[in-house]
Amino acid sequence: MATIKIKQVRSAIRRTARQKATIQALGLKKLNQIIEKEATPQILGMVKKVQHLVEVVD
């Protein structure tokens, strides 16, 4: 399965509890942190829900 790199570019402060939980479930803990995950439909859906806080890096 393909992998994607996800980078947190905006803070989760003053966001809804659901968005904070999604960021935490992705494994992101601090700004500019990059994680690598498999590109499953579940992960892609989570990225789409918080697309204003993260970006997919090459």
Image (cartoon, helix red, strand yellow):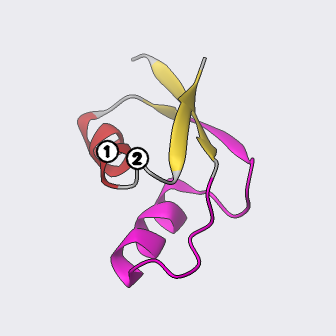
Q: Which residue is drawn at 32% across and 38% down?
A: 44
Magenta includes 48?
no
Task: Where is residue 17? Give x, y as percent.
Answer: 40, 83
Marking on residue 21: none
| 24 is higher (above) or lower (below) than 43 | below
Q: Which quadrant holds residue 49? A: bottom left
Image quadrant where residue 41 sits: top left
Determine the residue positioned at 51% across, 54% down: 53
Q: Which of 16 and 4 is in front in this view?
A: 16
Instruction: Give, as a single range, the part of the protein colored magenta.
Output: 10-36
Classify residue 50 as left or right of residue 54.
Answer: left
SS at circle 1: helix
The residue labelled by disc 2 is 51
| Residue type, mark 2 in image | Gln
Spatial CA distance of label 1 from label 2 is 5 Å
**Picture layout, residue 16 above or below residue 1:** below
Task: Measuring from the top left, give residue 15's x and y in whole percent.
Answer: 46, 77
User: Position of 6 compared to 48: left or right?
Assistant: right
Asked if residue 30 lies left or right of residue 2, the reply is: right
SS class of the residue under badge 2?
loop
Amino acid of disc 1: Lys
Check residue 15 for magenta coloring: yes
- Assess whether mark 2 and mark 1 are in contact (beta carbons under 8 angstroms): yes
Question: Looking at the picture, does residue 38 appear above or below residue 23?
Answer: above
Q: Residue 48 carries which label?
A: 1
Residue 1 percent location from the top left of the image: 39, 17
Left or right: 34, with 14 as reference point: right
